[in-house]
Amino acid sequence: MHRGAIAFTDLCMLVISIQSQVVHGHVGNSAAAYAMQAEGVNVAAVPTTLLSNHPRYPTLRGRVLDAELVADLLRGVEERDLVDEAAVLVTGYLGSTGNAGVIADFVERALSRNSKLVYLCDPVIGDDGRVYVADGILDVVRHRLLPAARLITPNQFELELLSCVKITDTDGLRAAADAMAAQRRIDVVATGCTLVDTPAGQVETILCAHGQLSRFATPRLPIRPYGTGDLLTALIAAHLAKGSEIEAAVRLAVETIFAVLVRTEQAGSAEMRLVPLPVSGT
C-alpha cells in the first residue's frame, strides 16, 4: 500500500450519504445505503431526489427535491450531531443547481466542524461522452465540491471533462489527477477505464494517489446495469469508515462490484442483484 493512504485510527463507522433515491432499482442512496449497512456501517442517507426509477427508463415519476427541503434535512443532520460522529461524507447525484449550492454549503460547514471527516465526492456529471446535468451543477462541482474533496470517484469521461486532459494511457491519467489536485492533496479513483494497455476484454478501476497508480482490472461483462458507480463509491466509503486504507478499500469494493455483476448477468436482470450483498473480507 502506498504511503499517505487514508486511514482512521479511531473507528467511527458512520457515513453521511447525500444523493438520489429511487423506488425501483439500485442507484444513488437506493444502492449505497443497503451496501454500506451490509458492510456493518451506519448510514445517514439524505435524498436529493425521490423518483420511481432511473431516468433512462421509458417513464419516470417523482421529482427532484426542492433545495429548501434538502437544506432543511441537512440542518437536521447537523442538529443531531451526525457530522461530529461521521467518518466519511459522500455526495453523488445532486439533482438541481439549487441543491448543489446548499449541499456545497453543508460540505463546507461539515469539514469546518469535523477536521477528521473525509469528504468523498462522486462527481456525477455524465458518461459515454454525454453530460446529463445542468451547466450550473457542473460549475458547483468544479469550483466548490472538488476543491473540498479528499477523494473523488469520477468515471473516465468525467475525469477528462473536469481535468481538461484526454486520457489514453497512464501518463494521461496521472496528468488528469495532478490537474484535479492543483495545490492540495486529493486522491482519484477513476472508474470504467479503458487505456491503451488495458488487457483486451477487461475494464479497470484505477487509484491515483501521489502520482502512484494502483490498477484493478476485471473482465468486461456484456451488461451495464444502472448504479454501479454509486455502489462502488459506497463500498469504498464503507471500508474507509471501518478503518481500511484507500488501496485496500478500492480493491475490496471492486471485488464486490464484480461479484454483483456476475450474479446480475446470470439472472438476466436489468437492475443489479444486490441482495444479499457479497460482503468482502477485511
Image (cartoon, rainbow, N blue to C red):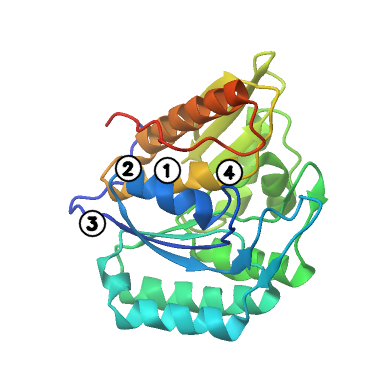
Residue 235 - label: 1
Report, in whole angstroms, how far the alpha carbon at label 1 lies from the one at label 2.
8 Å
How many other residues sit within 10 Å of disc 2, few (<14), some (14-19) or many (≥20)?
Answer: some
Query: Position of 72 compared to 171: left or right?
Result: left
Task: Nearest to the eye among marks 2 and 3: give it.
Answer: 2
Q: Residue at x 69, y 72 (%)?
A: 96
- The percent coordinates of residue 117 (x first, y second) are 34, 63
Of 72 and 85, nearer the camera is 72
Residue 136 falls in image quadrant = bottom right
In the figure, 106 relative to 257: above or below? below
In the figure, 208 relative to 60: above or below? above
Q: Is residue 6 visible?
A: no
Report, in whole angstroms, how far the alpha carbon at label 1 lies from the one at label 3.
15 Å
Residue under label 2, please give it.
39
Labels 1 & 4 near each other (Cβ < 8 A): no
Q: Which of marks 3 and 2 precedes in the sequence? A: 3
Q: Residue at x 81, y 44 (%)?
A: 129
> Callout 4, which amino acid?
Gly
- The percent coordinates of residue 36 (x first, y second) are 38, 48
Residue under label 4, please give it.
229
Residue 12 - label: 3
Of 211 and 83, nearer the camera is 83
- The percent coordinates of residue 155 (x first, y second) are 65, 43
Labels 4 & 3 near each other (Cβ < 8 A): no
The local secondary structure at tag 2 comes to: loop
The local secondary structure at tag 3 comes to: loop
